[in-house]
Amino acid sequence: MTKYTFKPKDFKAFTVDGLDARMEALNERVRPQLNALGDYFAQYLETATGEVFYPHVAKHARRSVNPPKDTWVAFATNNRGYKMQPHFQIGLFEDQLFVMYGVMHEDKNKAQQVKVFEENVETLKQLPNDFSISQDHMSQVKTYIHDMTDDDLAKAFKRVKEVKKGEFFVARTLTPGADQLKTDKAFLNYLEDTFEYLIKFYK
């Protein structure tokens, strides 16, 4: 029995039609791992940063018609919510697992918060080749950093500051059949390795 990782069949919860049926599938196949990952990495982040982190597992409570196309656990130092400050996420779409750190459009201080990436752009560019940038947390589309020019990155930073919906996340993704998802040990090693890189941007 695995506790933390996701099998290819777990990702297929997003193919279930209908809000209630999909939520039931997510609650059965995905939420237990998100809860376990929440407990594990809240402790991990506290040890790594010296600050108390709270896990926030997506409830999708506001949905009344459209079933969710992704789900996640987010980590923030505010136990009432995470969207209003820089935060970490571990989550899934149908075709990818993602790990991210960054600022969402709901963050009123995002123009200031994104400066940590801007001021550490060389660190950003030196991340391993499988790291990417997400400019919309609701989209599966991410761009590998090594495919972005300095101008691309500058435009991404500018968009966060000037566009209401602008967001910036540093991300790493896996496909459902990835070797790193085969066992809990391999998955936790991958996540810890990823968080080590992401924490460099946590201030």
Image (spheres, helix red, strand yellow):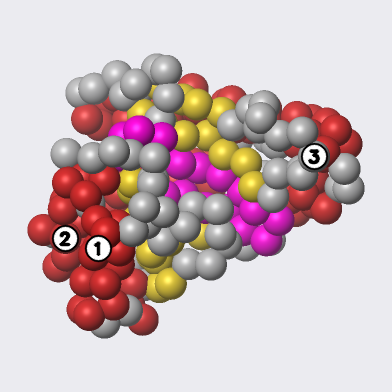
Range drawn in magenta: 83-100
Using the rendered view, name the quadrant where residue 139 is placed: bottom right
Instruction: Choose the circle earlier in sequence order: 3 or 1.
Output: 3
Residue 87 x, y percent position in the rendering: 36, 38
Instruction: Choose the circle earlier in sequence order: 1 or 2.
Output: 2
- Tell me if 93 is positioned left or right of 45 in this view: right
- Tell me if 200 is positioned left or right of 56 in this view: left
State the residue at coordinates (80%, 39%).
65
Residue 126 x, y percent position in the rendering: 22, 69
Instruction: Choose the circle earlier in sequence order: 3 or 2.
Output: 3
**Residue under label 2:** 118
Using the rendered view, name the quadrant where residue 25 is placed: top right
Q: Secondary structure at mark 2?
A: helix
State the residue at coordinates (47%, 57%).
136
Q: Quadrant of the C terminus?
A: top left
Q: Is residue 35 visible?
A: yes
| Amino acid type of the residue tagged 1 in the rendering | Phe
Q: Is residue 167 visible?
A: no
Marks 1,2: beta carbons within 8 A: yes
Q: Nearer the viewer, mark 1 or mark 2?
A: 1
In the image shown, does 187 or 34 lie closer to the viewer? Answer: 34
Q: Secondary structure at mark 3?
A: loop
State the residue at coordinates (20%, 23%).
50
Q: Nearer the viewer, mark 3 or mark 1?
A: 3
Disc 3 residue crowd, few under 14, some 14–19, many 20+, Cα 10 Å: few
Compared with 167, 19 (above or below) is above
**Residue under label 1:** 157
| Amino acid type of the residue tagged 2 in the rendering | Glu
Residue 65's label in the rendered image is 3
